[in-house]
Amino acid sequence: MALNATEGGDHIGSYRTYFFIWAALMLLLVATIVVAKVEVSKYSVLLNLFIATVKAGLVLFFFMHLKYENWFLKGVLFMVLVMLASVIGLTFSDVWYR
Amino acid sequence: MESTASECESFYHEKGKYKGILSWLMSTDHKRIGIQYLVALLTFFSVGVMLGLLIRLSLIAPGTFIGQETYNRVFSVHGIIMIFLFIIPGVPVAFGNFFLPIMIGARDVAFPRLNRFTWWTYLAGATLVALSLFAAGGAPDTGWTFYAPYSIRAKANITLAVTGVFVLGFSSILTGINFVTTIHRLRAPGMTWFKLPLFVWTLYATGWVQLLATPVLAITLVFIILGRVFGVGFFDPSKGGDPILYEHLFWTYSHPAVYIMVLPAMGIISEVIPVFARKKIFGYKAVALSAIGIASVGYFVWGHHMFTSGMSDTARIIFSFITFLVAVPSGIKIFNWVSTLYKGSIVGSAPIYFALTFIFLFSIGGLTGLIIGSLEPNLQLHGTYFIVAHFHYVMFGGAGFAILTALHYWFPKMFGRMYPERPAKIGWFILFIGFNVLYFSMFILGYEGMPRRYFDYPARYFPLHLVSTIGSWILAAGLAIIAGNLLRALFKGPKAPADPWGGRTLEWTIPSPPPAENFVETPVIRD
């Protein structure tokens, strides 16, 4: 993967990388629709949330350059992710057992 | 370095690009923005108090003063104004704006223009809410919670009010971003995390809650607007929606919002107690980290508002358990404040009276919160006056009294004037009596089964309603004395010295009122 750091610290990814990430996002979008339509089980929502997390992660890491940031920024994002997952999890402690 | 006269000139006399009212509205000075917020907050608080008095008046003679529909609108607007326009923005935007940069040795917040934008956004949101009161269709009658499905179907101006609250939410999010960034990036040399004033710690925790919780409210309100305008059925079972989902989403924000209100209030108390006890705070690190503990755990307890909504038993047990957990960091704060007071040389000035009252009233509010956080009592007490009493003890007894504490503690610094102590203490005493007469009666009313939000009631509840209404008049008299005393001092009070109380934080090292850029030289914190 060819990556260049400019003098200002900006990172420019190759077209090849960006193309593969875009292709992966498209595949994951198809997967989201399939999971929603097929309704595999009551865990479909969980599966789709996982797919959404992967999609958001790809965008954040590659397109928004989180990949090149320090551990603190990644840690803050991880904390927010855990918080969001906990909130959704707690909501489903109602929905699944109602 | 010798300071010149212009460097020490108060921020009130700063000559900027604009004059008159524009010199305030266009200012990016955190102190000017803080003062403007304070004026707006106290104005809305006054309106909220008047509406509260009207509710109490109506309840001693139902139908005599206002009709049923008007009653529904009055208690809804009382809640919307008090919650969204006064107590949620409350401490951070007024006192946080004014004191956060000074307390960490900075000249301003990290994003001064963004700060001005939050103030304008707040004004825009407040204007929309105000419009919803007077536009055709009538003021909202849903209560401040805008519960679906009624809020989707109601004929009143719900869309306008909800849009106003949506805009206010953005003001809150941007303030949170600004404060978190300021605390990370603009601390003076030597101001390490565990040397931060405790008020700053609570603003930091609050900033994160504002940042993470408020977007949930925003999207929930958008769902209501989509439901009303386009008929989208997020919360309508006939369209595949779920009304309980609304409650989940609403309280996912609105319970953390309680901590947006109370955490910085606790920060004020943590500043005031050591100054007037003439001691260092007991267990600084525990008090600082308990703010983070409250913010983190408080994010996961929203379900206790929904024990009777039809939620699953599993969820009810989980939420009840987490609710008890959040009492631990709150308890740490209370015990540390009391331990700080122990064997202190307590100076009996007005701010400590208000601060001690905060501890007393907030403890009652917190402990009754544990009663209704338990499943069984909650099933009996939910939707009764017990809940009304509980949240007024937390909101008014807690956050409200903390704002009064801050007003009396920081008044000399903000306005450069001293106020007479005696009227302040008389006002405090009358307010304290009025508060307890007004709200403690509600605990008993609720325990006896009086439902909240009801326009009329069986005759057996009348005596306690009468006591409660008399309490509201005493409370209003106390507030009037306090307001009159401070307003008089604003114009006629003697000039305040830089440090009238013997405070140890950085705001007391600069003149009263502070100069435009706060510090002539950036302070260096050594011990």
Image: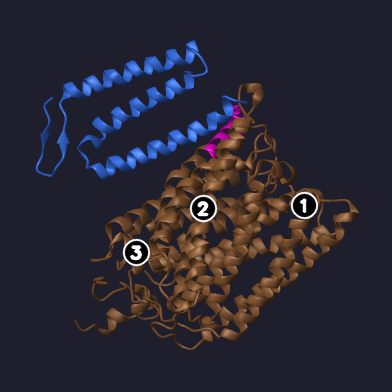
Badge 2 and badge 1 in a common chain: yes
Q: Are marks 2 and 1 in contact (CB under 8 Å)?
A: no
Q: Give coordinates of residue B53: x percent, y percent.
A: 73, 63
Residue segment shown in magenta: B220-235
Residue neighbourhood size for the residue with mark 2, other residues' Cα within 10 Å, grouped as few (<14), some (14–19), many (≥20)? some
Please report, as a chain letter, where disc 1 is located. B
Q: Which residue is mark 2?
A: B328
In this view, B33 is above or below B491: above
Image check: B478 left or right of B102? right
Q: Give coordinates of residue A20: x percent, y percent.
A: 23, 19
Q: Which residue is mark 3?
A: B196
Circle count: 3
For marks 1 and 3 on the same chain, the one whose residue lies earlier in the sequence: 3
The residue located at (30%, 81%) in the rendering is: B8
Tell me the brown chain: B
Rendering colour (chain A):
blue
